Image (cartoon, rainbow, N blue to C red):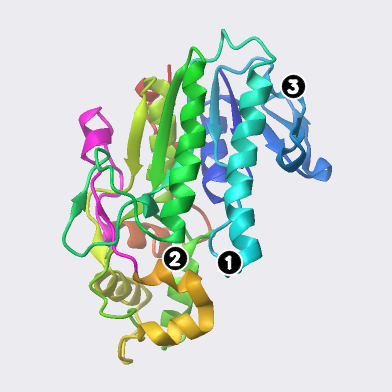
Amino acid sequence: MRILITGATGLVGSAIVEQCHKKNIAVNYLTTSKSKITSEPNFQGYYWNPDKAEIDLDCFDGVSAIINLAGATISKRWTSSYRKVIISSRVNSLRTLHDALSKVDTSKITSFVSASATGRYPNSLSKFYTESETAVDDSFLGEVVEVWEKETDKFKSFDFKVAKVRIGLVMSCKGGALPEMAKPVKNYVGAAFGSGQQWQSWVHIADLARIFMFVLAYGLEGVYNGVGPNPVTNNKLVKEIAKVLERPLVLPNIPKFAMQMILGKMSYLLFASQRVSCKKIEEEGFNFIFPNVCVALESLYKGSECSDTPGIGTLSKEYIS
């Protein structure tokens, strides 16, 4: 089995690649940097430049599934120019892939899975969102995800299964939000944001990688939330981080206006509330290794001292076809 992955060197991509290698699944990956291209039997790089619609068509050789994770980070100040980059990086990547696939034999490809985000769901302290929700958050992030998913849906014109995984707050010490949240706590200046009542739908990096592999292995279609079973409030999350780091929380919650002054419009990420359900993927037979935030944080900070991501190799053979 060989999988093509875009964004393979990112936080989620690296976890998926590691899992693939432990299961003897070969990986082709696309990179915009020719210096990052390696040539190994189970890890072969190919050049592409989505902004110019350039791609090496050899990247599809022997591929039976595709995982798309390409897109500029949203964890960077949302200036008017960077907002355009966030959208164009996602749209151009998908369009380049779509155009390329129309030029090659796709008969051996069975699945296409693209990343998305729970930021699509409207900001709410009371609602519990499932994949059937049609409303879209009236924020920039909601706009991004709506455009992203519409572009992904165009792949339904091919004769393979198309799925989208809406990713929540990824728990990992190797990147993403957790190290930034833990840093002030470690330095005795940690605090929740705003009221602290906003819901945060999180997922351990190991479980998220397993979700992508599970969707591919079983040829699932449609939308699946890439979150764990037990969302927590921001108050609860910060308290659990402090507990596992053995640090006190002595400061009052950080007011919204303060973070708006520091981060601008990007501060919306800290205060948006999306309580999201993972019931759909569980009903397909997926089991979470880390269902609770305390267990997830313990595994990261106590089990490995954040030097490694546990659980990546724990996907049972039945998940791989």
Identify the residue shown where x is 37% and y is 50%: 120
What residue is pinned by disc 3?
Answer: 57
Which element carries disc 2, helix, strand or loop?
helix
Residue 58 in percent (x, y) is at 75, 20
The residue depicted at 58 percent of the width and 66 percent of the height is 76
**Quarter of the image containing the N terminus?**
top right
Q: Amino acid at mark 1?
A: Lys
Q: Is residue 39 left or right of residue 161?
A: right
Instruction: Point out the image quarter for the C terminus.
Output: top left
* Tag 3–tag 2 contact (CB < 8 Å): no
Residue at figure coordinates x 30%, y 44% from the top left: 289
What residue sits right under mark 1 in the picture?
A: 76
What crowding class fits label 2: few (fewer than 14 Cα within 10 Å), some (14-19), or many (20 or more)?
Answer: some
Q: Which residues are magenta?
A: 272-294
Identify the residue at the far right of this view.
35
Question: Which residue is denoted by mark 2 in the rendering?
Answer: 178
Picture coordinates of residue 247, whole percent (x, y): 35, 83
Instruction: Assess whether mark 1 and mark 3 are in contact (beta carbons under 8 angstroms).
Output: no
Magenta: predominant secondary structure element? loop
Q: Which quadrant would residue 92 be assigned to in this image?
A: top right
Disc 1 and disc 2: Cα gap in Å? Answer: 15 Å
- Secondary element type, mark 1: loop
Sequence-first tag of 3 and 1:
3
Q: Nearer the viewer, residue 54 or 175?
A: 54
- The amino acid sitting under disc 2 is Leu
Left or right? Give the position of 103 relative to 276: right
Q: Amino acid at mark 3?
A: Leu
Does the magenta segment cover residue 280?
Answer: yes
Q: CA distance from mark 3 to mark 2?
A: 37 Å
